Amino acid sequence: SSGINAEWPLRPGDYVISVDPSIIVTAFVTTSVVFVSFTLTALYAERRSMLFLGSLLSTALSGLLILSLANMFFRVPSIALFSVYLSLIISCLFVMYDTQLIVEKKRLGDNDFIWHSVDLFIDFVIIFKDLMIILTDKEKKKRRSNK
């Protein structure tokens, strides 16, 4: 059997139920560092320079959805793991896109800070989830190799 649960798109909660608590801390700290780094990158980049990512990220997200749906039928563990890594990359880029989009909306008078916060919170949670899956998978592979 390979390293990742091929059913993770169906039941992601089952995959990380028995996780080492240190992985949770590692994933949270890593998520925080990644999130802050990509946010600062977007804030210090040239104004509106990352808004072009919107259409690319939407297309990538559609491709990820199709890949995940296809893998529900084929159940290939390497495709499931590839989907997690792809989701992580897309989510990191969404942090930059969403940050610049929020800044531009604010400049145009959109003061809905609650919805802006929700956008960034969703990005944060997806990055955390993806890192949890990746780190848990690596630990399970390490445990199997030690047996």
Image (cartoon, grey):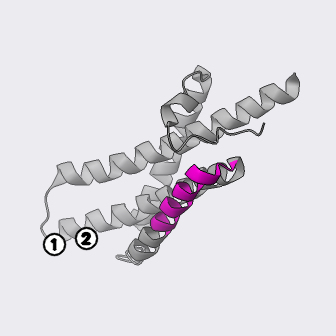
**Residue of label 2:** 104
Residue 50 occupies quadrant = bottom left
The picture places residue 38, in percent across and down from the top left corner, at 48, 57
Image x and y of residue 94, in percent: 43, 61
Residue at numbered disc 1: 108
Above or below, 14 relative to 31: above
Residue 14 placement (x, y as % from top left):
53, 29
Quick check: 44 above or below 6? below
Q: Are marks 2 and 1 in contact (CB under 8 Å)?
A: yes
Q: Residue at x 27, y 63 (%)?
A: 102
Circle 1: residue type? Leu
- Location of the N terminus by quadrant is top right
Residue lying at the far front in this picture: please name it.
73
All told, the count of numbered labels is: 2
Amino acid carrying label 2: it is: Glu
Does residue 100 appear to the left or right of 10 in the view shown?
left
Badge 2 density bin: few <14, some 14–19, many ≥20, Cα 10 Å: some
Whether the magenta-drawn stretch holds residue 70 is answered as yes
Give the quarter of the image for residue 131: top right
Q: Which residues are magenta?
A: 60-76
Circle 1 crowding by C-alpha within 10 Å: few under 14, some 14–19, many from 20: few
User: Separation of disc 2 and disc 1 at Cα?
Assistant: 6 Å
Q: The C terminus lies in which quarter of the figure?
A: top right
Element at badge 2?
helix
* Magenta run includes residue 49: no
Q: Is residue 32 above or below residue 49?
A: above
Q: Main secondary structure of the magenta part?
A: helix
The local secondary structure at tag 1 comes to loop
Q: Residue at x 46, y 72 (%)?
A: 59
